[in-house]
Structure formats: C-alpha cells, structure tokens
Image (cartoon, helix red, strand yellow):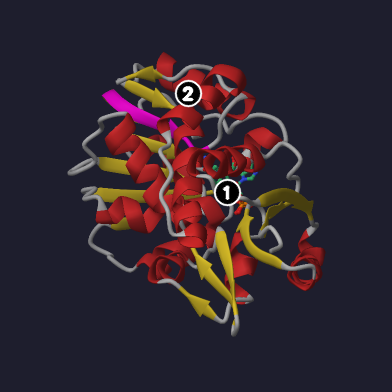
C-alpha cells in the first residue's frame, strides 16, 4: 500500500513547520504519511494543486497568500470554511477537493486551553483582513467576544470581511487611520503578514487596555515587533502564534486521519527549538 501524501502549499513556504508537526503527529499515533512543501506563486496555485493531485496527493494545508483562492477551487466547503471565505485544509474526495478551515478552532483552543484566557465579553481588535484574519474571526465571535473591531491596510478587504461575518451588532470595520481614536481593547490580535517583509506595523499607544491580551498569529522573529509593543503597552498576556499553529495542525490531522494527536509534546519541542518564549498567563 502506498503511503498517503500531504503537503503545505504557500509562497514562501520553505520556513513552514507543518512538515515537522505532521510527521511528529504521525509518529505519535503510528500513522504512516509523507508531508512536504510546495512553493507556488499566486498565479501558479491551481496548476500546483492539480500536479499534486495527479501525483496522488490526498490532503494539503494552504498558507499565505492562497487561502481565499483555495476556497474557490473546492467542490465542497465546511461551514467554518464558508463563513471564513478561506481554506487552510484540503481533503481529496472522489468529487474533487473539500475545503475546511481549522485556523479559528486552533487559535481559540490555544488561547482558552493552553493559555487559560476567557474570551467572553472582551472588547477586541483584529488587525489585518487576509486569509488568517478571515479564518479566525468566526471562531472568535463564537467564543463570545463582546465586540470585534477590524482594521486593515486596504479598506476594501476590511469591509468584505465584515460583510461576510454579518453580526453587525458586534463586528465593526474601521479605517487604519481611525486606530488612534478607537479606545482600549481587552484583546488585540495582530494578523498581518507585514513582519515577513520587514517590520510589524507601528501602532498607537493606548490601544491595549490595562492587562489586556495581545496575540500575534505569527511566531519566531515575525512576532517579535508586535509582542515587544504589547509588553511595552502593559499587556497581561503576550502570546505568539506557535500554539495556534500546532492546534490548527492537530485539527487538520483529525480531518485527514480520523485521529486527534496530543499536542503538548510537539508544542514543547517547537517552543524549545524555534520560537522565543511566551509571556503572561
Ligand atoms: P494574507 O496574505 O492572506 O494577508 C496578509 C495580511 O497582511 C493582509 O491583511 C494585508 O493587508 C496585511 N499586510 C501585509 N503587509 C502589510 C503591511 N506592510 N502593513 C500592514 N498590513 C500589511 O496572509 P495570511 O492572512 O494568511 O497571514 C497573516 C499572518 O498570519 C502571517 O504572519 C502568517 O504567518 C500568520 N498565520 C499564522 C498561523 C498560525 O497557525 N499561527 C496560521 C495562518 C497565518 P492588505 O489587505 O492591505 O494587503
């Protein structure tokens, strides 16, 4: 019997920790698998995916900048992928690709279970409106946030994400220039890719309420600038995206293999080797 093939498709993607995470999960549960990386520029996404399927690929993770595009190639979308308008997990079926989004459940599980945060009632700010922001927003609303303000460099994407989320009582799209006047937030989530190309966006003081929680979906060097800002702003918790990465991977693994891995050991291994420590509760 041939070993099932999986891959993460992104651009860039060489840095991805997903191959190590899925290989470790497979070893833990005695499930044989191959998991590689596929670097595809935006215009190459569809052809790269078709080649992967032709070569026997059975499942893929999708990372920046392809998450919205991936949703458009699916024959079927899970409810959470449809609400997000973005896909981070593809499953090959006889009918074609099925798309799911495990980013939101991964983030909420990391924040509530690993870091013990109660998200209910929090006045919250989401910075960014790309694939990752779209993926996490529905799950954050489901976790009981009081409000979700959204700002993004391009206003059109902010409005599109807010419209897709509905819930006009709790979702408030704003222009980036409004940031200084929005008051303090109990939860600030940084979901831009700006640090990959240089530095995290500079943010005004007073954005984080005293002892508020600050979360960067990035990890390692990409999270340093935002988390430094958060600590300087008096954050009660400053959390990077490493735990989310492991949790969303576990949820993808469950979809593909029907078994949920234990994430604690893999998280500890990656924390030790690849990313600066988290501070706060
Ligand atoms: P996308 O390419 O889909 O979106 C990029 C986002 O970043 C857009 O909102 C874009 O704004 C914004 N942006 C890019 N450059 C700048 C800049 N210089 N200043 C301000 N905003 C900028 O990427 P993703 O949403 O998929 O990824 C975003 C981040 O989340 C990445 O750091 C990624 O590594 C991380 N991530 C972490 C995960 C985890 O498991 N921990 C999972 C998924 C993502 P605009 O619309 O104006 O272009």
Magenta segment boundaries in residue numbering: 211-217
Which disc, if any, is residue 268?
A: 2
> In the image shown, does 264 or 38 lie closer to the viewer?
264
Q: 10 Å neighbourhood of mark 2: few (<14), some, or many (≥20)?
A: few
Percent coordinates x, y for residue 280 in the rendering = 33, 18
Q: Is residue 48 magenta?
A: no
Quadrant in which residue 222 is drawn? top right
50 sits left or right of 216 in the view = right
Local crowd size for mark 1, using a 10 Å CA cut-off: few (<14), some (14–19), many (≥20) = some
Residue found 21% across the figure and 48% down from its top: 146
- SS of the residue under disc 1: loop
220 in relation to 248, above or below: above
Instruction: Mark 2 vs mark 1: give the one in front.
Output: 2
User: Which residue is most to the bottom?
Assistant: 95
Percent x, y for residue 195? 64, 33
Dominant secondary structure of the magenta stretch? strand
Pointer 1: what residue? 153
Mark 1 vs ligand 1: CB below 8 Å: yes
Res 115 → quadrant: top left
Under circle 2, the secondary element is helix
Q: Which mark is residue 223?
A: none
Residue 183 in sight from this viewpoint: no
Q: Examine the structure image and report whether residue 213 is included in the region drawn in magenta.
A: yes
| Residue 248 seen | yes
């Amino acid at each position: 019997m041939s070993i099932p093939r999986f891959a993460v498709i992104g651009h860039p993607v060489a840095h991805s920790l997903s191959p190590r995470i899925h290989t470790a999960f497979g070893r833990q549960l005695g499930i044989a698998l191959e998991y590689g990386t596929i670097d595809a520029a935006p215009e190459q996404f569809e052809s790269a995916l078709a080649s992967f399927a032709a070569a026997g690929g059975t499942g893929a993770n999708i990372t920046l900048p392809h998450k919205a595009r991936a949703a458009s190639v699916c024959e079927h979308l899970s409810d959470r992928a449809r609400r997000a308008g973005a896909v981070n997990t593809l499953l090959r079926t006889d009918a074609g690709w099925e798309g799911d989004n495990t980013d939101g459940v991964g983030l909420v599980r990391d924040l509530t279970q690993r870091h013990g945060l109660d998200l209910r009632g929090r006045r919250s700010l989401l910075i960014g409106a790309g694939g990752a922001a779209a993926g996490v927003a529905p799950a954050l609303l489901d976790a009981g946030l009081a409000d979700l303000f959204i700002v993004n460099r391009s206003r059109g994407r902010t409005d599109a994400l807010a419209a897709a989320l509905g819930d006009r009582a709790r979702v408030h799209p704003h222009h980036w220039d409004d940031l200084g006047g929005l008051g303090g937030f109990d939860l600030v989530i940084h979901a831009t890719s700006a640090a990959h190309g240089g530095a995290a966006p500079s943010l005004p003081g007073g954005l984080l309420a005293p002892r508020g929680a600050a979360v960067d979906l990035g990890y390692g060097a990409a999270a340093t600038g935002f988390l430094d800002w958060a600590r300087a702003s008096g954050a009660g918790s400053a959390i990077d995206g490493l735990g989310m990465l492991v949790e969303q991977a576990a949820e993808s693994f469950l979809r593909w293999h029907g078994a949920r891995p234990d994430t604690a050991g893999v998280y500890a291994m990656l924390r030790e080797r690849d990313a600066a420590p988290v501070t706060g509760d």
